[in-house]
Image: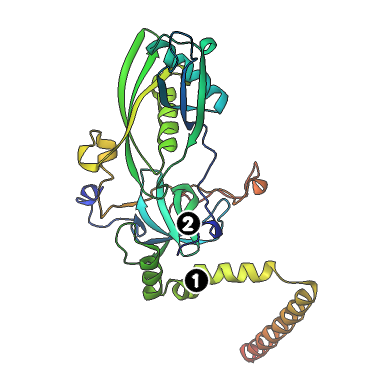
Amino acid sequence: MIKLFSRRRFDMVAFRFHQYQVVGRALPTAADEHPKIYRMKLWATNEVRAKSKFWYFLRKLKKVKKSNGQVLAINEIFERKPTKIKNYGIWLRYQSRTGYHNMYKEYRDTTLNGAVEQMYNEMASRHRVRHHCIQIIKTATIPSKLCKRESTKQFHDSKIKFPLVFKKVRPPTRKLKTTYKASRPNLFM
Amino acid sequence: MQADQGPLPVQPFKRYVEIGRVALVNYGKEYGRLVVIVDVIDQNRALVDAPDIVRGQMNFKRLSLTDIKIDIPRVPKKKTLIDAMEAADVKNKWEKSSWGRKLIVQKRRASLNDFDRFKVMLAKIKRGGAIRQELAKLKKENAA
């Protein structure tokens, strides 16, 4: 029996974007006693933002606003198997300087939150799209056979082997960092 | 990746990132720990495992590859990993290697107390004296 709480996790860095499940509905009125309940999975940096995003999207889909609706539940969704490497496909809609575009991107990561964070960083760097201009349409775990991008497919190799070409010389803690060094570092691995 | 190594007859690289490569963590919370590369996530990160930590991802920048490689399938179960590490005798190989020995000596030196440092000083003086005696003998023989 593996006792996970007694072993240390070292890679649970703080994700910037958390995945939330928000459940809400319009307020019951005399005309409609039991309004339909809608559930949405979305990414936000915190719960408050998640609820706000929920109303933003729901307004666009149904005739309901935050003022005449209620959030019934908001739960954070965590990764089921954070030790398993998965190929994530993310469908997104983003606003560029000239209009809206759809995109499909693939990422290899252990968690969906990690992949989404990679996506936001990549969109910002490659396309100069800030995170508020990105809407995630859909995410999915893609089996290796169905991956479309060469950059993810090149890691689908059970006998993967490559050398590390460039050794980054750095002190083991930031406290030991100095501006000047006595000798040039040897960068060969 | 492997196709690129075709035309070159001799590669300057001896240590490869591969499944089963033992690496030393050189930065961060797990500094100084020996871990095994269990899978490669992408160009910068590996899935890394050790007997007493939960399997997780680590950037290659935080890993220093060693010469030791063990024989494991891709992402093995914890028990398989521990058995493979025992079979390859990773711990002993590491402690006998010059890199491993240097780290042990560094750790020992850092953990000396004042009395130990006094003993080291006396031992150094004694060793220096013995060396100088031998040198004096050799000089006399040479002069003669």
Screen quadrant of the C terminus of chain B: bottom right
Marked residue chain, label 1: B
Quadrant in which residue A119 is drawn? top left
Left or right of A15 in this view: A125: left
Image coordinates of residue A180 in percent, x first then y, are 64, 43
Q: Which chain is disc 2 placed on?
A: B
Vertical comparison of A37 with B25: above or below = above
> Which of the labelled discs sits on residue B98, or is there none?
1
Coordinates of residue A116 in the picture (x, y in percent): 42, 32
Q: Earlier in the sequence, mark 2 or mark 1?
A: 2
Horizontal side of A173 relative to A9 (left or right) equals: right
What is the crowding at mark 1: few (fewer than 14 residues within 10 Å), some, or many (at least 20)?
A: few
**Residue A47 percent location from the top left of the image:** 55, 27
Residue A103 position by quadrant: top left
Q: Amino acid at mark 1?
A: Ser
> Which label was assigned to residue B54?
2
Q: Is residue A39 left or right of residue B9?
A: right
Residue B42 to residue A55: above or below: below
Local crowd at mark 2 within 10 Å, few (<14), some, or many (≥20)? many
Residue drawn at (75%, 76%), measured in percent from left and top? B116
Measuring from the top left, give residue B114's x and y in whole percent. Answer: 80, 72
Query: Which secondary structure, mark 1?
Result: helix
Q: Amino acid at mark 2?
A: Val
